[in-house]
Image (tube, helix red, strand yellow):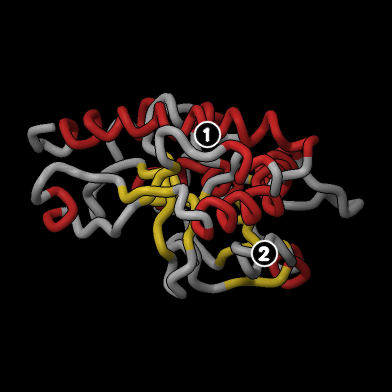
Amino acid sequence: MTSMYCAFDRWEDATGAALRIFDPFAYRPALYERMVPVSLSECPALAERWPVMWRRDGLGDPELVVLRGLRADAEMPDARTQNRASLPLLVQAYPFRFRDPAQGDEIGLERAAPMRERDSGSYILDDQGNLLPGAELKVRALEAWAEDLETRTLLTEVVFRNALVERVVLPEGVAERFDLPDFFSVTPAPDDALIFSAIPREHWLLVARFLVAQRLSLYTMARLIALAGEPA
């Protein structure tokens, strides 16, 4: 489970408590969460700025994430110059979340207070029980993250089972200094037949775009290292 999440509140409990929600930058993950699980569809846009790679989660299973910065306890580089739409979908959706992020199941809210209230916030539902605009944006982001979950899981299984991934090599000392896990990426010239024979045809374009974006995203690692004050 990503470190963004700790305590899950059921939808009925959260919406019945007159809870106010705020824009993503009012919450800690937008500024401080360095590794965020991502969907395949958002990777081409994210890859322009950050590396997209797999890491092992707490159970040892590969999890596709974007690495937004190297320092665990520091504000992410350039965090305050971004707009909401440039954030990973799970950060856009925060504090809305799935009970089990790996499964994309029951929707609820993380029990989290904003670091600072940039505005007066908004309730989740109106008097008729309909989603208010701010809440609707967050729910849509959460649902968009889950749309390709099955394909993402299938692709992950295929590339790891068939040894089509390689460990991402970082400059000496970087992983140790910043307490980074091992990261993995699809090899530069994977066996396409092994990948696409396991993926339904309607998702081939999505997977192909992801594979290109992930390879290109690795070049942004040098930028993160430079922003952390390390020689690339």
Does residue 172 appear left or right of residue 71 in this picture?
Answer: left
Q: How many labels sit on residues? A: 2
Give the Cα separation between the discs numbered 2 and 1.
22 Å
User: Which mark is first along the chain, 1 or 2?
Assistant: 2
Q: Residue at x 63, y 39 (%)?
A: 193
Q: Residues within 10 Å of mark 1 (few under 14, many from 20)?
A: many
- Answer whether residue 18 is visible to the viewer in this image: no
Disc 1 marks a residue whose amino acid type is Leu
Residue 211: assigned label: 1
Which residue, given by chain and number where applicable, does mark 2 sit on?
103
For label 2, the SS is: loop
Residue 50 lies in what quarter of the image? top left
Residue sitting at x 29%, y 42%? 69
Residue 192: percent from the left, percent from the top? 58, 36
Instruction: Depth check: give the residue in front, 151 or 33.
Output: 151
**Residue 138 coordinates in the image, percent (x, y):** 66, 44
Which residue is found at the position 52% from the left and 27% from the top?
45
Q: Residues within 10 Å of mark 2 (few under 14, many from 20)?
A: few
Residue 63's disc number: none
